[in-house]
Amino acid sequence: MPVSVHKKAPANVSDLQHLNNGAHHGDIFGNEDGGPHITIGILSITKHDGGGTAAKAPHTVYVIVTEGEISVEDAAKPGDISVLEPGDITRIDKGTTATISSSTSGKAYYISQHEFGIDLKEHLV
């Protein structure tokens, strides 16, 4: 089994796919050998006057905050907003509608069960 290395993962927002309202993401690695889907990527959030980015999770996703702060709100619990800081981790279960935002900015890694390289814009609410 080979070792894969991805040096200098895209840290610049311009290298990431824009979702909406200050949210950007980019897959880094994924299981491309026909096995179960698992993808690791980068998430960047900046403050946006239009509010947060709401999406219905098509898969379970784990978000590990590495810089700044990222807020997460479950649509089933309006107003119950969790503010995540570096080292904090959240799990968003498949089928959950969640809004992510930041009052400043934040960066995170995500690990999820989606096919590498899919366009997540189709899941925006």
Image: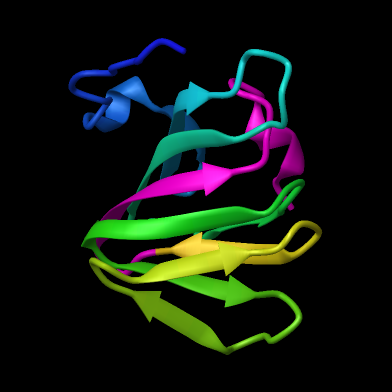
Q: Residue visible at 51% across and 62% down?
A: 100
The answer, for residue 51, to whether it is visible in the render is: no
- The percent coordinates of residue 117 (x first, y second) are 59, 20
- The percent coordinates of residue 26 (x first, y second) are 44, 29
Q: Is residue 51 left or right of residue 106?
A: right
Q: Quadrant of residue 13?
A: top left
Is residue 115 highlighted in magenta? Answer: yes
Q: Residue visible at 46% across and 13% down?
A: 1
Q: Is residue 109 left or right of residue 106?
A: right
Q: Is residue 27 left or right of residue 122?
A: left
Q: Is residue 24 left or right of residue 121?
A: left
- The percent coordinates of residue 44 (x first, y second) are 34, 45
The answer, for residue 13, to whether it is visible in the render is: yes
The number of discs equals 0
Its colouring scheme is rainbow
Q: Residue visible at 59% across and 44% down?
A: 112
Q: Residue visible at 48% across and 49% down?
A: 21
* Residue 20 vertical position relative to residue 39 in the rendered view, above or below: below
* Residue 73 vertical position relative to residue 20 in the rendered view, above or below: below
As drawn, the residue found furthest toward the front would be 1
Residue nearest the observer in this picture, 83 or 54: 83
Q: Quadrant of residue 76?
A: bottom right
Is residue 67 highlighted in magenta? Answer: no
Image: magenta residue range: 102-125
As drawn, the residue found furthest toward the right would be 95
